[in-house]
Amino acid sequence: MQTLVILGSVMMFLAVALGAFGAHALKRKLSADMIKIYETGVQYHIAHGLGIIMLGLFADQLPSSSLVLTAGWLLFAGIILFSGSLYTLSITGVRKWGAVTPLGGVAFLAGWVTLLLAAL
């Protein structure tokens, strides 16, 4: 599915750009703890961006392409909620953003379960 490959490619571009921004612009501005939080956001961003691309490339080989598309959008939502909240928390220092992070984790889990259902 071309939509997922495009979406995943945009997510990967942003993951690399945000990773470089964190490594170069934020290293001297944030505490070690906040850098670690930021890096966790980048790590999950990259993993799930690649997952979205994978879904797009292999969608036609699975019985339910609509479930594959749903899985891709759930992974995208997970990136926005999980990684986005960690980026925001680390840059602003506002700990309340940490309450959003588990919602992103649930979206990631739902995406992978949806892929499992598509494969079955």
Image (cartoon, rainbow, N blue to C red):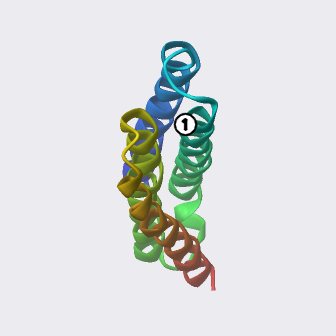
Q: Secondary structure at mark 1?
A: helix
Residue at (36, 57) in percent of width and height: 96
Say which quadrant the C terminus sits in: bottom right
In the depicted structure, whether residue 5 falls above or below residue 65 = above
Residue at (49, 72) in percent of width and height: 106
In the depicted structure, whether residue 16 falls above or below residue 58 = above
Name the amino acid, label 1. Answer: Met
Residue at (36, 36) in percent of width and height: 92
- Bin the neighbour count of mark 1 within 10 Å (Cα to Cα): few under 14, some 14-19, many 20 and up: many
Q: Give the percent coordinates (x, y) of residue 56.
A: 50, 54
Tell me: 94 left or right of 24.
Answer: left
Tell me: 51 left or right of 102.
Answer: right
Relative depth, front residue between 108 and 69:
108
Task: Look at mark 1 in the image and give the residue it sits on.
Answer: 34
Q: Give the percent coordinates (x, y) of residue 6.
A: 40, 41
In the depicted structure, whether residue 29 falls above or below residue 116 = above
Tell me: 61 left or right of 102.
Answer: right
